[in-house]
Every structure is written in structure tokens, then in C-alpha cells.
Amino acid sequence: MTTTNWSPQSWRHKTALQQPTWPDRTALDHTLKILSDQPPLVFAGEARDLSEKLAAAARGEAFVLQAGDCAESFESSADSIRDRLRVILQMAVVLTYAGGMPVVKVGRIAGQFAKPRSSDTETQGDVELPSFRGHIVNDIGFSESERRAEPNRLLMAYNRAAATLNLVRAFTRGGFADLSRVHAWNQEYVADSPQGAKYEALANEIDRSLAFMTACGIDLSKESALNQVDFFTSHEALILDYEEALTREDSMTGDWYDCSAHMLWIGERTRQLDGAHMEFLRGVKNPLGCKVGPTATVDDVVGICETLNPDRVEGRITLITRMGADKIRDTLPPLLEAVKDTGQPVLWITDPMHGNTYTAADGHKTRHFDAIVDEISGFFQAHEQAGTIAGGVHLELTGDAVTECLGGSDELGDDDLARAYETMCDPRLNGRQGLDVAFRVADLLASRS
């Protein structure tokens, strides 16, 4: 990959949006020095492996499920992390069987500690304080000390990410992800779901397939492909000091990798072609994503591709559309056509969450399940129209029994929002709603295949 006039520090000569105001530069520099001496959280070979899998998805040979918390908390328990992983594994099994192809599992996990904000400050009553920017920067409590940007939190984020990664690797390699176990979880969902009858046929088909393999003499417990899974990490590369400190030169290839995660993405608010985030990420060889909202133009999207992937490497670029259910069918097709005309090998996935957020009557931010599913349907329709590949979905979800998004098989309504509204930022699908989405996407994949 051609990278000219780039270094891990070259972003500092560009305008960097959404960065915290650190009150003590000396303390920040000291923290970054410690952070830069820490072991990498992920390795270059793992990132290259993900690039190959994403390239397959761009060709229609796999499907991507990218999912996880809106903003990870330093206080998340091991049980919460386990339950989030469990939902993703359940969803992946449903999508794999329906689509007849591998599902690439990418978590918003072990690094999604920062959040962009629409304003630098927040006002409550007569008090104005810095906005909460995620646990990597400050705390959600509304006091001067809690909202102060603390450099030590960068180290706390690294340590928390390392612990989370250790747990995820143990679960995905230690039997927790065994196919028969995951299928049993789906059977529990079917038995307990108001729409269980609708999904029972698919669950029974999976059950018959497992029984057939066993009858053929295949010991499912000894087949690594059936009791272990590849699971990759990703987050928005927002706090550039943190990302730079975890960037390493690969000893095998001489290429630079941001070793904070396997995949990094640029958000809708920081995708300026001449901005610091684009400058930093163009030089690392991780697979990269970029959010694309309804205001994105053809020139914007083509420019993103050319800036981040001038050599047109397969698996390098994922465009994550976040249009809104009422806009995607009109705004996405011209972008698909324009990128297709350039010959760029882009993977397209949909984020049906962010474009469908609104404020309920009681003041809670929420999203409705029906709008989420409608945007996914519009995404598939736009790709069918353009003759391109609908390559995956990107979801904010948790395994906890929250009541932050409305609708779904439990038909959550406005009156349910306050019952278990626990997010630090944006509303998330709960475990049941996540699996509801998986079955809906399964229908779309089955009709496509």
C-alpha cells in the first residue's frame, strides 16, 4: 500500500475534531509515553486475517456482523461482556445457516470507550460543564471533577481493553462458542419468544443438520471449526493521542498497524478528507471503516475511498451507511453506482441505528425496531438495484435486558423506556431484539441466495 509523507504523528498538522481539552499537557505526555511502551492489544497478522475475510464479504462470499455496545463502560462486568458475546454468536449462527456462507464476527468491543458529541459542553440548570466523551476521557456524572478530562483514563482504557480481550479470547476458544451450545441458546429464544412459531422451522433445520453430522460419525466437540470461532475487535478511532500511542511498525512487513483493535473506523463527524482522522488512518494498514450519512455526496464517498485506499487493496475499506429508513432508498443508490464506476473493491455494510434515533415524549433518546429493520431492507433493495453486494450489518446492542429501543417481539412501548434505560449514550437493542434482527436479516439473505 502506497503511503507518502505519512508518519504516526503527521495527523498533528491537520485539524483534529472531537478531541478532548486536556488540562495538563505534561501529564498527558507522561501518560502517552507509558502507553506507547505497552504491548500491542492485537497483532498485525490478525488484522491481515480480518482483511482477507472482509475482502471475501465484499465479493459476496461472506457476510459481516459488526455489533456491540454504543459506548463501553469501565464498569462492565464479566457477565455483561459474556452476554453481549453470546448474543453476537447466536445472531451469527442464524445468519450463517440462512445465508449459506461464513459470517465474519466483529465486535464493537475492547476499545469503544470514546463517543463524539454534538456540543463541547452540556448545561444543566445554570451549570455548564464539558460534555461526557466516554470513559476514556471523563465520567458521566455531572460535576466539575467528573467532567474533567483525565489523561490517566487512557491507561485505564488500555487495561480495560486488555482484560476484555482476554475474556473474549477465552470464551471464543474455550468451548463457550461450541455450535451445539449456541444452537441450544437459539432454541431457548424460540421457546420463549412471542414469535417463536415463526422461527421454529429454522431452528429445527439447524437441529437436523447437527444431528445429521453426528450420525455421520462427526464428533462435533472435537471439530475446531464447530467449537471455536474467529472474533475480531473494532472501535471508532476517535481519540487520536490514544491511537497514535498504540501504533506499531510490523517487524515482518515494515508496515504500520494501529494495535488498539483489528479494525478502526472514522465517524460521520470526523470524515473530512483534509482532517486529522483521515490523515492518521490512511497510513495504518488495518482494515478501515468510514461512516457515511445522508449528507454524503458522490465526491465525498469517492474521495474517502481514494484517500484511504489509493492502491485499491481488497478488504481495506468498509463503508458503513447510516442514512435513516426514510432516506436510504433515495440517497444510497447514487453512491453505490459512483463507487462501482471507480472500480474500488469496497465492502458495504449498513448501520440502521444512528439514522433512526429520536426523542420520545418522556425525553429518552430511542429507536424503533421497525425503522431499524426497514433501513436494513432498504439497504438490500438499494444494492439489488445497483447490482452491488449488501455485505453486512452494524448494530449497537447489549446482552442485558434493557428497554432502550422500542418494538421487537416483546413490543416495547414508550411506557417501558424508563424501566431499564441504562445506556451511557445511545439506545441499544437488547438481546432479544438483536436476535429478532438476525432472523429478519436471515430472511433477506435467504431470498437473495
Image (cartoon, rainbow, N blue to C red):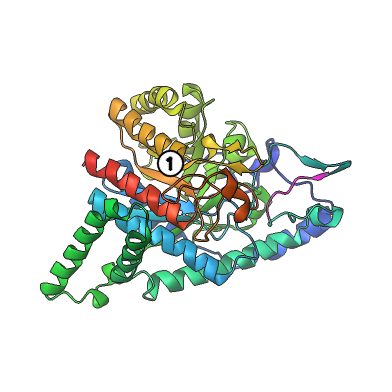
| In this view, 285 is above or below 340 | below
How far from the left and from the top, in percent, is residue 247? 58, 55
Whether residue 380 sits left or right of residue 299 in the image: it is left
Quadrant housing the C terminus: top left
Quadrant housing the N terminus: top left
The residue lying toward the viewer, choosing from 23 and 38, is 23
Task: Assess whether residue 50 is covered by the magenta stretch.
Answer: no
Circle 1 crowding by C-alpha within 10 Å: few under 14, some 14–19, many from 20: many
| In this view, 344 is above or below 92 | above
How far from the left and from the top, in percent, is residue 192? 37, 61
Amino acid, disc 1? Thr
User: In percent of the image, x 34 and y 42: which residue is there?
Assistant: 391
Q: Main secondary structure of the magenta part?
A: loop
Residue bearing the label numbered 1: 318
The residue lying toward the viewer, choosing from 209 and 358, is 358
The residue lying toward the viewer, choosing from 442 and 226, is 442
User: In percent of the image, x 63 and y 34: which residue is there?
Assistant: 275
Circle count: 1
Whether residue 75 sits left or right of residue 179 in the image: it is right
Answer with the quarter of the image where residue 248 lies. bottom right
| In this view, 134 is above or below 361 | below
How far from the left and from the top, in percent, is residue 313? 38, 41
Q: Name the residue furthest left.
A: 216
Q: Secondary structure at mark 1?
A: strand
Q: Inspect this view and state whether residue 46 appears.
A: yes
User: In percent of the image, x 43 and y 72: which residue is there?
Assistant: 171
Q: Inspect this view and state whether residue 255 appears.
A: no
Image: magenta residue range: 129-134
Task: Assess whether residue 131 is covered by the magenta stretch.
Answer: yes
How far from the left and from the top, in percent, is residue 442? 30, 47
Whether residue 380 sits left or right of residue 281 in the image: it is left
